[in-house]
Image (cartoon, helix red, strand yellow):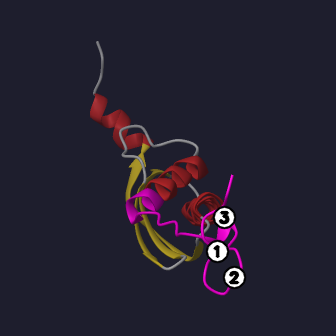
């Protein structure tokens, strides 16, 4: 089987060197949101799962994650775990560097407020 015409300059280009791969921002955002859920292990009862927004420029992703946490808890440790997991997963799955992950805690869910909302059962 004959190969097609050789590229200019007479050399051949390896398959891995041809073309381009583009990953949409919304795909990277889904990876980041999933990674944040993995880092937290659970969504607070009555809470919303983490949400992520991403801006990609070349192979660099800037990520913003919004989440809800149980109260009381170690908020700093949980946010740190989310930052690490998101950066690791985006790098591993999308091949992008993540120089920053901004974490916004939108709401705290207290065990006391959940039980007060349920009222007494007779």
N-terminal label among 2 and 3: 2
Question: Depth check: 11 or 68 in front?
Answer: 11
Estimate the x, y position of residue 4 in percent, counting from the top left: 60, 65
Q: Splitting the image into 4 quarters, where does residue 54 fall? A: bottom left
Q: CA distance from mark 1 to mark 3?
A: 13 Å
| Residue 23 magenta-highlighted | yes
Q: Splitting the image into 4 quarters, where does residue 16 fall? A: bottom right
Which stretch did the figure color magenta?
1-29
Q: Is residue 99 above or below residue 88?
A: below
| Residue 50 magenta-highlighted | no
Q: Identify the element where label 3 is drawn.
A: helix
Q: Which residue is mark 2?
A: 10
Q: Which residue is mark 3?
A: 15
Residue projecting furthest to the front: 2
N-terminal label among 1 and 3: 1
Magenta stretch prevailing secondary structure: loop
Q: CA distance from mark 2 to mark 1?
A: 6 Å
Assign the C terminus to one quadrant of the image: top left
Q: Is residue 57 above or below residue 93?
A: below
Q: CA distance from mark 2 to mark 3?
A: 16 Å
Q: Which residue is mark 1?
A: 6
Question: Depth check: 71 or 60 in front?
Answer: 60
């Amino acid at each position: 089987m004959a190969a097609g015409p050789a590229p200019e300059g007479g050399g051949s280009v390896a398959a891995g060197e041809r073309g381009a791969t583009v990953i949409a921002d919304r795909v990277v955002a889904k990876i980041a949101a999933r990674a944040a859920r993995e880092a937290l292990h659970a969504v607070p009862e009555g809470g919303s799962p983490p949400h992520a927004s991403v801006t990609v420029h070349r192979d660099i992703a800037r990520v913003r994650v919004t989440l809800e946490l149980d109260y009381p808890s170690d908020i700093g440790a949980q946010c740190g775990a989310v930052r690490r997991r998101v950066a690791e997963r985006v790098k591993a799955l999308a091949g992008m560097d993540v120089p920053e992950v901004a974490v916004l805690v939108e709401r705290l869910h207290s065990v006391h407020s959940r039980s007060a909302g349920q009222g007494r059962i007779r």
